[in-house]
Amino acid sequence: MKDAALKPGEAGNNAERAGVLLPLPLAGAYDYKLPRGVAARRGLVVTAPLGPRESLGVVWGKAQGGVGDNRLRQALPLAGEPVLPAGLCDFIDWVAHYTLTLPGMVLAMALRSRQAFEPEGHRIAYRRSDAVPARLTPARRRALDAAADGLARSIPQLAEDANVTPGVVRGLIDAGALAATQLPEFAPFAAPDPDFAPPALNTEQGLAAHLLRGAARAGRSGVSLLDGVTGSGKTETYFEAVAETLRQGRQALILLPEIALTVQFLDRFAARFGVRPCEWHSDLSPRERRRAWRAVFKGEARVVVGARSALFLPFPALGLVVVDEEHEQAYKQEDGAIYHARDMAVVRGRIEHCPVVLASATPSLESYVNAASGRYAHLKLARRHGLAVMPEVRLIDMRADRGEVGTFLSPPLREALAATLGAGEQAMLFLNRRGYAPLTLCEACGHKLTCPNCAAWLVEHRYRRRLVCHHCGFETATPPACPQCRAEGTFIACGPGVERVAEEFRGVFPEARLAIASSDTLHGPAETQGAIRAMAKREIDVLIGTQIVAKGHHFPQLTLVGVVDADLGGSEGDLRARERTFQLLHQVAGRAGRAEKPGLVLIQTRNPADAVMQALAGADRDAFYEQERRYRQTAHAPPFGRLAAIILSSPDGDAVRAAGRALAKAAPAARGVKVWGPTPAFYALLRGQTRERLLVQAEKAVDVQAYLRAWLGAAKLAKSVRLTVDVDPMSFF
């Protein structure tokens, strides 16, 4: 497709024929003819017939030919002939090529519905009129007083402002005291002011901000790793690069790994720039997403804060990309078009000729190595902002300090909790395990309750009285008898989840105000932010949560963090397990002591001699990273080698296994390439699909994509078998 691409504005030899890419799982562009006088500009958005229906499409290149005019169907440009930015088109091509994804599937992430190109609708609002109602109750008087400022409000808005019911407002409308007026469907995005509230930066922040401002001013591609300890003010520092980007008249994109972090982040942004930025994430309604897409496309949205899919928005003047918490695994999209947003952000910055900032207290090993080698600029913030200092970290050896059988809070942790609560301070207990217990088994015969659709245990959620599979969503009540031995009343809960820790905590500290924070108890960003604000207002004494509480939150009175089981995730059988464990626990520990009061972190572990635990206790992050770097280098693993995973899945287990053997046998021999497998996936049964994996390991210089295309392009698989390619896999499940 690239050979046939048009340059922006190029019509080609035959302006009435063009290759049109559709946002569908298709291998390439289809030939269409355009109306006379319409130039076949790359990026031109059209409607194109496909079978009996019409689809949005984009002119992607020159027509391939081979189809006569009489058989060629016509594509029509949308009103105003909108054109996607050239940088976005090139980015889509790059992502499709790198990830071995059909280009139409990548386009689907960038091209919204046709309604995004249509003018916004209108909404009805009401203003005070000159008429006076015959009956003037106290509630009506309050509503009219609220409307006296002349601003137009919706019925719910006016009712809320006046503290009356919507019925009171409707009565005033019927009486003619409020007059209707049409307003745009949405208020336009206000422009952030780069000079609204400049922060007072310390010396380290000031130097890093100076370099980032210079990169934004120069308008050249390049990557900076903003590597700062938790609480060092990384956000305020890269906000200075955003401010300079605004001064240059360009747009900025800030990626966040979790939607739950968005609201708190938006408050910080508004405090710095005077207004909130444009948001982009899955919790927006379809109308809000269309509005945001349209505002980005028109250049009205100057700063966008969003999840990983915001990378595919149509920025006409992108001048900066920031990836906050760049190490987070949430940036990896595992289905559909499989890509890593951090890596693709670097690519988009290169295509758009703009700087990219990667920010983290615990960088990914890939970014750490790139910074150490000089490929990325390395900007360090080694101390916390203001008077805050890093917390003290202590290890609790659960082999010696376990406490009573059946309890999960060790005596030292209980003592620390008592001291913290007695001092009127706050604490956080962290356990990265949802529900009440991860395993339910029969005490009589040892039978484990497992999901019928997945090779996974059912997790007990005692508050809901359900057993749940966290992979496919299957749930059921606990059976009255063991399905294996038919014994009744013999099921026992094994291991703790956050609900079980909360139960134990309540038994020891019944007067303390407690909240549980996990994806089971907090549904969506609004509820999550409600819990975070309650914690910030000191309406909660102890927050017990999963990784949802591990990052991005600032609680000035939080002085104690207890990690209930630090050994979870340390032996997942993949090369990044130790790195992820360190990053998560370091981020959790970083919630303590972020203000003037010193913090204490207690980590419960059965393996205190482990390198991860020693690095946490000794505050020696770089020594741990160097150890991991040497291990990866010896193993020729990323970032010193290349990996690509091939996942085969089907409801027919025999077909999957046969396909795996045939595929492995057909793997071409190539210098610097090894193919491992097939072998059953970690979850060999997932959502009713039997799964097998193969792994391609290659030297750094090998073109893995070319190898995979040559190999997989000739593969003949049963129709029931699905093949998925994951270039640069992050997990091995």
Image (cartoon, rainbow, N blue to C red):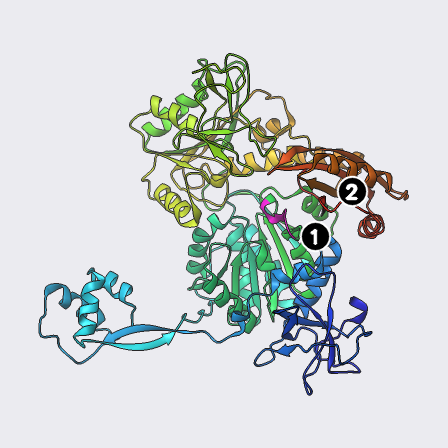
Q: In terms of secondary structure, where does tag 2 sit? A: loop
Q: Nearer the viewer, mark 1 or mark 2?
A: 2
Tell me the quarter of the picture where residue 101 sits: bottom right
Whether residue 81 is visible to the viewer of this picture, yes or no, is yes
Of residues 358 and 504, which is closer to you in this image? 504
x and y percentages locating residue 46 in the rendered image: 63, 75
Vertical relation: 250 (above or below) 449: below
What residue does disc 1 label? 376
Q: Residue at x 43, y 51 (%)?
A: 264
Examine the structure image and report whether residue 326 is included in the region drawn in magenta: no
Vertical relation: 269 (above or below) 547: below
Q: Residue at x 85, y 51 (%)?
A: 710
Q: How many marks?
A: 2
Of residues 93 and 268, which is closer to you in this image? 93
Q: Pointer 1: residues within 10 angstroms few (<14), some, or many (20+)?
A: many
Seen in the image, is 585 located left or right of residue 6?
A: left
Q: Measure the alpha-carbon separation of dots 1 and 2.
A: 16 Å
Vertical relation: 474 (above or below) 705: above
The amino acid marked with disc number 1 is Tyr
Q: Pointer 2: residues within 10 angstroms few (<14), some, or many (20+)?
A: some
The amino acid marked with disc number 2 is Phe
Q: The magenta stretch spans which residues?
A: 330-336
Quadrant in the picture for the N terminus: bottom right
x and y percentages locating residue 441 in the rendered image: 51, 19
Q: Residue at x 37, y 29 (%)?
A: 420
Mark 2 or mark 1, which is nearer the start of the sequence?
1
What residue does disc 2 label? 640
x and y percentages locating residue 464 in the rendered image: 39, 33
Seen in the image, is 138 located left or right of residue 152?
A: left
Seen in the image, is 397 located left or right of residue 570?
A: left
